[in-house]
Amino acid sequence: MRSQSDRYKIRRGRESDVDQIARLQAAVQLQAATGGEPHAGISAWAQDLLTGHPSVVPDDFLVVEETATGRLAASLVGLRQEWSLAGIWLPVVQVELVGTAPEHRGNRLTERLLAALHDRCATDRVPLQIIEGIPHFYRRFGYDYALANGGAPTMPANALPDLEASRPDVYRGLLTVRPATAADADGLANVDRRQADGDALVCPRNPVVWRYEIMGRRAADIARREIAVLLRGEDVQGFLVHGSGLSAAGELTVFAATCEPGAHWPEAAAAMYAHLGRVGRRHATTTQRPFHAVRPLLDADHPLARIGPRGIPARPGAWYARTGDPIELLARLAPLLRNRWQAADLRWPEPTLVIDTYTASAHLHFADGELTTVTAKRSAVGASVDGNPHAAIPPGALLHLTIGHRTLPEVLDTWPDAAVRDGLTEQFLTAAFPRVPPRIWPRN
């Protein structure tokens, strides 16, 4: 009798897989929207990822091949990118296009694919994986809702500037918005580089990736966005990223918006909303469908949301995040922790601060009160062997802290098995882990 391990094998993707992967994914993704027919937008996205995306190679795909036939039974892709957390660069893998052919479901192929991907991330020292997908499903594979996605209010179309007031020849502000061209790529990358040094969690792009986003994707690619530039004269001061059409609900989705310097946001917001109104009305005219609203997938504190017209409150969505080694992630942030403690004028009085995660412990080493390194102490038995740590924080809670999704008081309120030894420890860790605004538009 053949075992499941004999029936299937997992391997890395190849250039020759493009047609099979595109067909497989088109047949299993978003079927409710197509009535069971292949999804052309998913097919185009898979083909773009395999044949032209500047950040992706076929090797980034993992596929399950049926041994007897050589056909693909399931696949996923790990999109490699670098994010910046308040100036600290973090390797990240975004998991996308997780799908299994119907006739092969029930064989735990998703579990095997994710295990292979996580092993690869551990080998390559990629500390963070994220995925946006089926509610709750990915928790069983070690993912947790640890990165807010959305939450900004939806803006009704009738609250946007009207057609006449938003005409370019009428609007006299110093900041203007127009569709981006390939010539804007260097200016957009410069804005991204400066944003990476701010206090948010961002996903910067270089000029090559910006040119691809502007003009490199197939028209049918479901991940294609329209890029607009915010200009002061001819200088690029920011950008606006929105959908390439209206959703089935008549909404124009906003994925990212940036303006610098921040003091210009009131004027930038007016120009951006005027542009979104023009785009929404244009799509409504072209498709003969109503334009109902602008839906920003931005956090509720984003300047475009705070300064814009009064909208309809929206509940934040979910990015699920995972780390195979929260102490490794913490160690990468050591320079940021040191800077935060210096800014708060805090100096640790002992040589070491120990955070127990119940499976291992993080040892933060100090010299003259300032952080020098972070190391891990692991137990061969499985549980931590530090008997009297300064803090005890479960691995999932530590992930929430390190990427700025929750503050220490929130963790202590949410996790009953999280604790700190004394008031000084609580003061230090509260200063180390403030909430960080998520301003993520991933490279998909």
Image: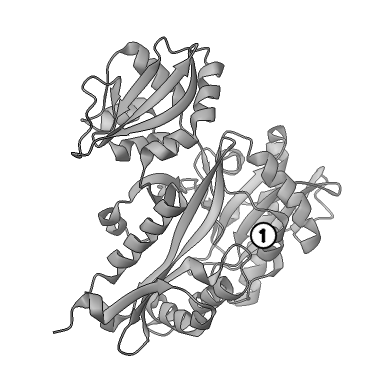
Query: Which residue is located at x 46 percent, y 32 percent?
Result: 435
Residue 236 to residue 181: above or below? above
Residue 351 point in image, percent of width and height: 40, 14
Q: In this view, does 312 lie to the left or right of 50?
A: left
* SS for callout 1: helix
Residue 227 point in image, percent of width and height: 68, 59
Residue 218 to residue 306: above or below? below
Q: Is residue 144 left or right of residue 288?
A: left
Write down the quadrant of residue 399 in the picture.
Answer: top left
Camera-nearest residue between 201 and 323:
323
| Total marks in image | 1
Query: Which residue is located at x 42 percent, y 53 percent?
Result: 123
Query: Which residue is located at x 49 percent, y 26 percent?
Result: 337
Q: Quadrant of the N terminus?
A: bottom left
Camera-nearest residue between 422 and 44:
422
Residue 329 point in image, percent of width and height: 43, 39
Write down the quadrant of residue 166 in the picture.
Answer: bottom right
Q: In this view, does 436 lie to the left or right of 399?
A: right
Q: Residue furthest front?
A: 380
Name the colouring of the figure.
one colour
Q: How crowded is mark 1: few (under 14 residues within 10 Å), some or many (20 or more)?
A: some
Residue 325 point in image, percent of width and height: 36, 43
Q: Quadrant of the C terminus?
A: bottom right
- Residue 170 in sight in this render: yes
Residue 265 to residue 293: above or below? above
Three-letter code, disc 1: Val
Q: Mark 1 points at which residue?
A: 209
Q: Which residue lies furthest to the left in this view?
A: 1
- Residue 167 in sight in this render: no
